[in-house]
C-alpha cells in the first residue's frame, strides 16, 4: 500500500512539473517576437539608413569621386579654358604608397598577444596563420588598397570578413570490386557509393559435401562521390554605397544597425540554400541602388537596364544582410542578430543570433562622436576648385594676349578672313585700318603667387609637398640638413597619424574577425606551409579573444636609414658576443638572428627564413649528438690493447734487466771462483796456470751474452 502511494505521489509530481514547464514555454512563446514584427523593425531601420546614406553621405562622396577624377565642374564656357587641377588625386597618390608600404611591408604586420604563458605558442601560430589567410588565401594587398583608397577619397573604407562554407565534390569511377571492397567503401560516411552494375565473376560451383549450388561471386562497377568541406575565411572590400549604418552610430561596436545591401541573382540566392520559388517572386527589374548617385558617379557606364534579363535564374534581387540589436526572445535584453531580407518588401529569409559584426572600417580623419569623419578629398577639394579657376583665368589671359580680339569696320573687311586664325593668313580689307587688334596685356604673372599660396595651404593641411614627395629635385638644394629633415618629417607626421588611426581601428578589427572566424568555423586541422615548413594548424584550441598589436613602421625614417641603423646594431651585437662570449648580459644569438632577419626583410625578401635559421631550432648533427656505439667500442678496444702492449713491454724490459743483472752476478761469481780455484791449484800443485787467459775467455763469454740480450730486446720492441 505504501509503495502504491509513493508511485501516485511521483506521478502527480511529474504531471505538475509538465504543466509548469508548458506554462513557462507558453509565456516564452508569447514574449518572443514574431516574424511580422521583426520584419517591420528591420524594414524601418533599412529605410532610415538608406535615406541617410543615399541622401546625405553618398552625394558628398560622389562629389569627392568627381574631384579625384578631375571631372569638369559644370560651369565651363565654350571658348574659355576648361582645365581642372588634380590636387585631390595628387595628394591621395602621394599618401597611398606610404600607407601600403607600412601595412604590407612585413609578413607579420599584426601579432596576437597571448593571455597567459600557455598561449604563447598558440598566439605565435595564430599570427602566422592570420597573415597566411590575408596574403595567401585572399588577395589582401588589393583588399587593403581598395579600402585605403575609399577612405582617403570617400570618407570610409569597408572590408568584410566571412567564412565561406565551400564544399569540394569529386567523383570517381571504380570497376571490378568484390563484395568486401564494396562493403568497405559503403562504410565510409564521407563517400556516396552508387552501384552502376553488378555481374557474376566465373561460374556457379557445387559443394561436394552437400551438393548445394553456390552462385559465382559478384564484381561491381561503382561511382563514388566524395564531398569534403573546404571552408575558407574570405576578405573583400565592399563598395561604400553598399554599406548601411544607422545615423546615430558613432562606431561599429556601438551601432544598433549595420547592413550590407547588394543586388544578387536568383541563382546566387538558390546556391545559398534559399527556396527557388520564394526568391523568384522577390526578383525585380529595379532596386534601390539604381537611385544611388555615388554608384553611377563611380561607374557612369551603369544604367537602370542592367536588371532587364528574361531568364529567371539571372534576374536581380535586392539582398540585404542586416546586423541589428533587438530583443527577439523577449527576455528584456537586446541581442545582436543577423537578419537577411530580400526584395523591395524586405521579406525575412533568415534570422539567427551572432556575436560580432563582420566589418572593419578605415577612416583617415575620424570625428569624435560620429561614424563618418573627413577624407583627404574633403580637405583638398576647395583648393582644387580655387586653383582650377585661377589656372583657367591665367590661360585665358595668355590666350587673349597671344590671339587678341579684332576690331573690324563693318563692310570694310572680309569677316571670313578675320575669323580665320591660320598662321600667315591674309585679311582682305577695303581701306587701311579697317581691321585692328584689340590688345590685351597678359596679367597671369599676378596669379602665380596665388597659386603658390594655395599650394602652401594644401601642404599645411596634408603635409604633402613637392619637396617631401620627391617631385622637385631643386626644392631643397640650398637647404640645410635640418631644414630638409623638417620638411620630410612634416609629411611623415601626417601619414603616420593616418597609419596609426588605421592600425587602431580597421586593422585590429580585421584581424580579430579573421581569428574569430577560424576558431569558430574551421572544424578540422589544415596543413599549410609556413617558413618553408609544412605545419598542421588546428584553431579549435586557440583563444578567440586574443588581443592583437599592429606593427606599423612609424617614426623610423626611410628604408635605407633603418637598414643602416640595423646594420650598426648587428655589428655591435657581434662585438659584444666576441668580447663577452655567446652568453652575456647584453645580447645572444636569438637577438642577433632577429636583427639579421629584419635587415633581410627591409631589403625586400619577405621570407627571411630562406637566409637565417631560428637559433632555438638548432640541434647538433646526429653524428655529434649520438656517436656510433660500434665506433665507441672499437675505440675502447684499441685503447685497451695499447695499454696492454705498454704494460707487457714494461714487464719484458724489467725481466730483461733482471736477467742481465743475474747474469752479471753469476759471471762475477764464476770469475771469482775460478781465480780462487786457480790460486788453490797453483799453491797445491805448484803448476804455473794461465790466469790471464781464463779472464779473457770469461770476457768473451760476457760480450756474447750481452749481444744475445740486445737481440731479444729489439725483437720485443718490434
Image (spheres, grey):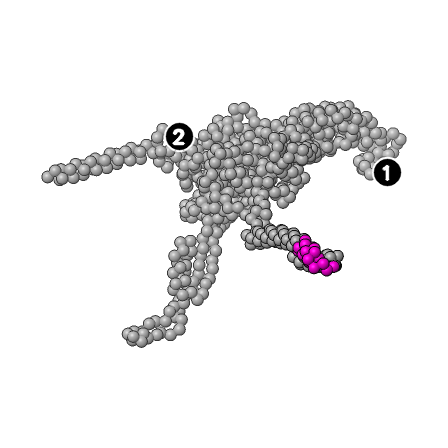
Image quadrant holding the N terminus, namely: top left
Which residue corresponds to the image point at 18% horizontal and 38% vertical from the top-left?
Answer: 11
Side (left or right) of 464 relative to 180: right
What is the distance, in whole Å, between disc 2 and disc 1 at their CAs?
83 Å
In this rendering, the answer to whether 312 lies above or below 477 is below
Q: Which residue is mark 2?
A: 334
Of residues 219 and 691, the one nearer the viewer is 691
Which residue corresponds to the image point at 75% horizontal and 57% vertical from the top-left?
Answer: 692
N-terminal of the two: label 2 or label 1?
Answer: 2
Let me know if residue 678 is in the magenta part.
yes
Answer with the quarter of the image where residue 714 lies: bottom right
- Badge 1 density bin: few <14, some 14–19, many ≥20, Cα 10 Å: few
Q: Which mark is residue 202?
A: none
Of residues 153 and 470, the one nearer the viewer is 470
Label 2: state its secondary structure: loop
Image location (x, y in percent) of residue 51: 50, 31
Of residues 198 and 628, the one nearer the viewer is 628
Let me know if residue 165 is in the magenta part.
no
Image location (x, y in percent) of residue 667: 67, 55
Q: Which residues are magenta?
A: 670-688
Q: Which residue is mark 1?
A: 424
Which residue corresponds to the image point at 59% horizontal and 53% vertical from the top-left?
Answer: 644
Image quadrant holding the C terminus, namely: bottom right
Which residue corresponds to the image point at 38% horizontal and 57% vertical from the top-left?
Answer: 187
Which residue extends farthest left? Answer: 1
Side (left or right) of 610 relative to 80: left
Amino acid at each position: 500500500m505504501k509503495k502504491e502511494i509513493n508511485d501516485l505521489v511521483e506521478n502527480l509530481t511529474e504531471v505538475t512539473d509538465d504543466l509548469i514547464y508548458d506554462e513557462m514555454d507558453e509565456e516564452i512563446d508569447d514574449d518572443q517576437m514574431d516574424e511580422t514584427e521583426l520584419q517591420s523593425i528591420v524594414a524601418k531601420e533599412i529605410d532610415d539608413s538608406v535615406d541617410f546614406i543615399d541622401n546625405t553621405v553618398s552625394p558628398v562622396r560622389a562629389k569627392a569621386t568627381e574631384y579625384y577624377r578631375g571631372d569638369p565642374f559644370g560651369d565651363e564656357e565654350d571658348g574659355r579654358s576648361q582645365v581642372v587641377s588634380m590636387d585631390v588625386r595628387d595628394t591621395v597618390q602621394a599618401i597611398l604608397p606610404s600607407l601600403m608600404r607600412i601595412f604590407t611591408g612585413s609578413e607579420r604586420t599584426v601579432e596576437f598577444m597571448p593571455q597567459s604563458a600557455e598561449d604563447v605558442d598558440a598566439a605565435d601560430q595564430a599570427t602566422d596563420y592570420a597573415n597566411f589567410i590575408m596574403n595567401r588565401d585572399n588577395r589582401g594587398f588589393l583588399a587593403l588598397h581598395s579600402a585605403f583608397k575609399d577612405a582617403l577619397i570617400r570618407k570610409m573604407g569597408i572590408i568584410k570578413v566571412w567564412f565561406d562554407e565551400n564544399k569540394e565534390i569529386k567523383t570517381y569511377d571504380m570497376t571490378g570490386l568484390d563484395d568486401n571492397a564494396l562493403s568497405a567503401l559503403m562504410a565510409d560516411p564521407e563517400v556516396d557509393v552508387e552501384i552502376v552494375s553488378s555481374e557474376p565473376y566465373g561460374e556457379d560451383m557445387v559443394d561436394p559435401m552437400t551438393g548445394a549450388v553456390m552462385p559465382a561471386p559478384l564484381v561491381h562497377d561503382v561511382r563514388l562521390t566524395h564531398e569534403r568541406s573546404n571552408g575558407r575565411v574570405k576578405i573583400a572590400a565592399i563598395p561604400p554605397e553598399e554599406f548601411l549604418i544607422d545615423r546615430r552610430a558613432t562606431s561599429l561596436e556601438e551601432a544598433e544597425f549595420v547592413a550590407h545591401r547588394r543586388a544578387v541573382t536568383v541563382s546566387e540566392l538558390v546556391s545559398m540554400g534559399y527556396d527557388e520559388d520564394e526568391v523568384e517572386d522577390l526578383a525585380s527589374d529595379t532596386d534601390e541602388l539604381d537611385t544611388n548617385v555615388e554608384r553611377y558617379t563611380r561607374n557612369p557606364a551603369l544604367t537602370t537596364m542592367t536588371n532587364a534579363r528574361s531568364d529567371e535564374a539571372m534576374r536581380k534581387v535586392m539582398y540585404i544582410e542586416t546586423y541589428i540589436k533587438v530583443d527577439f526572445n523577449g527576455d528584456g535584453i537586446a541581442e545582436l542578430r543577423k537578419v537577411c531580407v530580400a526584395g523591395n518588401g524586405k521579406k525575412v529569409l533568415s534570422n539567427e543570433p551572432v556575436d560580432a559584426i563582420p566589418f572593419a572600417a578605415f577612416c583617415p580623419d575620424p570625428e569624435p562622436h560620429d561614424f563618418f569623419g573627413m577624407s583627404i578629398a574633403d580637405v583638398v577639394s576647395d583648393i582644387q576648385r580655387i586653383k582650377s579657376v585661377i589656372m583657367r583665368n591665367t590661360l585665358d589671359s595668355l590666350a587673349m594676349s597671344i590671339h587678341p580680339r579684332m576690331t573690324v569696320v563693318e563692310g570694310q573687311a572680309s569677316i571670313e578672313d578675320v575669323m580665320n586664325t591660320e598662321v600667315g593668313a591674309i585679311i582682305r580689307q577695303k581701306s587701311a585700318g579697317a581691321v585692328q587688334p584689340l590688345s590685351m596685356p597678359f596679367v597671369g604673372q599676378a596669379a602665380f603667387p596665388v597659386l603658390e599660396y594655395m599650394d602652401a595651404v594644401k601642404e599645411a593641411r596634408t603635409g604633402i609637398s613637392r619637396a617631401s614627395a620627391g617631385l622637385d629635385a631643386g626644392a631643397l638644394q640650398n637647404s640645410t640638413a635640418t631644414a630638409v629633415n623638417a620638411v620630410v618629417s612634416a609629411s611623415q607626421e601626417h601619414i603616420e597619424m593616418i597609419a596609426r588611426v588605421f592600425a587602431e581601428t580597421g586593422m585590429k578589427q580585421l584581424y580579430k574577425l579573421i581569428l574569430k572566424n577560424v576558431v569558430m568555423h574551421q572544424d578540422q586541422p589544415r596543413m599549410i606551409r609556413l617558413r618553408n615548413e609544412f605545419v598542421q594548424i588546428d584553431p579549435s584550441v586557440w583563444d578567440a579573444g586574443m588581443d592583437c598589436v599592429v606593427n606599423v613602421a612609424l617614426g623610423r625614417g626611410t628604408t635605407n636609414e633603418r637598414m643602416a641603423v640595423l646594420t650598426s646594431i648587428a655589428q655591435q651585437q657581434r662585438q659584444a658576443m666576441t668580447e663577452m662570449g655567446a652568453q652575456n648580459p647584453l645580447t645572444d644569438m636569438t637577438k642577433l638572428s632577429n636583427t639579421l632577419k629584419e635587415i633581410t626583410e627591409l631589403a625586400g625578401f619577405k621570407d627571411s627564413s630562406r637566409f637565417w635559421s631560428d637559433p632555438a631550432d638548432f640541434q647538433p648533427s646526429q653524428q655529434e649528438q649520438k656517436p656510433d656505439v660500434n665506433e665507441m667500442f672499437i675505440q675502447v678496444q684499441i685503447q685497451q690493447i695499447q695499454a696492454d702492449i705498454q704494460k707487457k713491454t714494461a714487464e719484458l724490459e724489467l725481466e730483461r734487466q733482471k736477467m742481465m743483472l743475474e747474469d752479471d752476478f753469476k759471471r762475477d761469481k764464476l770469475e771469482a771462483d775460478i781465480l780462487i780455484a786457480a790460486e788453490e791449484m797453483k799453491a797445491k800443485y805448484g803448476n804455473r796456470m794461465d790466469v790471464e787467459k781464463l779472464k779473457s775467455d770469461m770476457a768473451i763469454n760476457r760480450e756474447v751474452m750481452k749481444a744475445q740480450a740486445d737481440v731479444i730486446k729489439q725483437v720485443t720492441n718490434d
